[in-house]
Image (cartoon, helix red, strand yellow):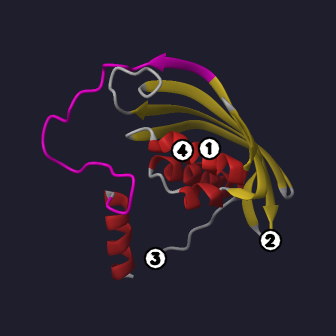
Amino acid sequence: MDGDPVTTSDHDLIREVVSRYCRGVDRLDLDLVRSAYHPGGIDHHTGFDGTVDEYLEWVGAALRRLSGTMHIIGNHLAEVSGDVAVSETYGTAVHWGEPADDPRRNFTTGFRYVDLMTRVAGRWAIRERWAVREWTRSDAGRLIAKEGAGPSGARDRTDPLYLAQDIARRLT
């Protein structure tokens, strides 16, 4: 898009990696999740340790058992030294699915992503991630229907995000 030039710092680019990961998980776009990691990257999650390829297989299966997720990221600090950075991001993730009274499918968790990131060929990405689970609470039986008509999220190309991106492409 045309307009004022955008200046992006390493800190902004590193935070964008985390945001891209969260969008990929929430939209069930595993290619977007993969783009947050370097090839051969390592991930440590509750219940999982392995390569990014193994992680995508594991997390994809877990996500398909849910109706949706929403990651909200907050505090973010990146300590950058040349082409290496340690990034810490605080967040909350909400998970929901059927049956609505299943606490393993309906829960909210507080987490920190502790990421070892490197810049390779000008591209920041995760080399190794520790997804630190700080707390979890059950939301089983608490989900209610929307109060009226309006846009709804989708975990595919019908999501309003992709509609907006398509319109933006036509405008440029």
Q: Nearer the viewer, mark 3 or mark 1?
A: 1
- The disc labelled 4 sits on which kind of residue? Ala
Do we see residue 115 in this rendering? Answer: no
Residues at marks 4 and 2, CA–CA distance in whole angstroms: 32 Å
Residues at marks 1 and 4, CA–CA distance in whole angstroms: 5 Å
Question: On screen, 8 above or below 44?
Answer: below
Q: Nearer the viewer, mark 2 or mark 3?
A: 2
Which numbered disc, 4 or 3, marks the residue that appears first in the sequence?
3
Q: Nearer the viewer, mark 1 or mark 2?
A: 1
Q: Determine the residue positioned at 64% across, 61% down.
A: 35
- The disc labelled 1 sits on which kind of residue? Trp
Please tell me the numbered disc located at residue 121: 2
Q: Determine the residue positioned at 50% across, 73% down.
A: 4
The residue that disc 3 covers is 3
- Residue 136 in the magenta stretch? The answer is yes
- Residue 152 in the magenta stretch? The answer is yes
